[in-house]
């Protein structure tokens, strides 16, 4: 069994953080494209894409 070191742990943490940040960035831009302002998008970046789409649809129904 290969030894798992602190360096391995740090590397995995960095990769995990980068992936999480990329997902947040993607959801932020999705929210902006769907008409949310920057403050709303900053909050929505931590939600799923489904939630973002559902809120955009709900907002669209309110406007009509």
Image: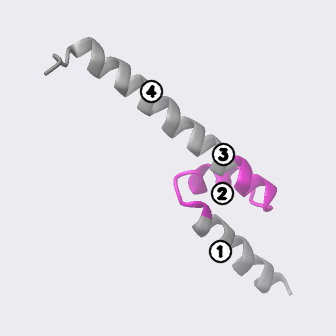
> Reading the chain from its start, which is encountered first: label 1 or label 3?
3
Name the residue tied to disc 3: 26
> Reading the chain from its start, which is encountered first: label 3 or label 4?
4
Left or right: residue 61 compared with residue 1: right
At x 86%, y 87%, the residue is: 64
Check disc 4 and report its element: helix, strand or loop: helix
Instruction: Mark 2 vs mark 1: give the one in front.
Output: 1
> Reading the chain from its start, which is encountered first: label 2 or label 3?
3
Check disc 2 and report its element: helix, strand or loop: helix
- Quick one: quadrant of the N terminus? top left
Picture disc at residue 29:
none
Q: CA distance from mark 1 to mark 3?
A: 17 Å
Instruction: Mark 3 vs mark 4: give the one in front.
Output: 4
Name the residue tied to disc 2: 40
Image: magenta residue range: 29-49
Q: CA distance from mark 2 to mark 3?
A: 14 Å
Name the residue tied to disc 4: 15
Q: In which quarter of the view is residue 6 placed?
A: top left
Above or below, 25 against 30 in this view is above
Check disc 1 and report its element: helix, strand or loop: helix
Instruction: Mark 2 vs mark 4: give the one in front.
Output: 4
Instruction: Mark 2 vs mark 3: give the one in front.
Output: 3
At x 72%, y 54%, the residue is: 30
Picture disc at residue 54:
1
Q: In which quarter of the view is residue 37 placed?
A: bottom right
Name the foreground residue: 34 vs 62.
34
Residue 53: image location, x then y, percent: 68, 69
Left or right: residue 47 compared with residue 32: left
At x 19%, y 19%, the residue is: 4
Residue 47: image location, x then y, percent: 53, 59
Q: Residues within 10 Å of mark 3 (few under 14, many from 20)?
A: some
């Amino acid at each position: 069994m290969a030894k798992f070191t602190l360096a391995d742990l740090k590397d995995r943490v960095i990769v995990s953080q980068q992936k999480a940040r990329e997902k947040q960035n993607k959801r932020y831009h999705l929210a902006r494209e769907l008409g949310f302002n920057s403050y709303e998008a900053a909050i929505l970046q931590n939600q799923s894409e489904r939630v973002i789409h559902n809120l955009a649809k709900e907002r669209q129904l309110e406007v009509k």
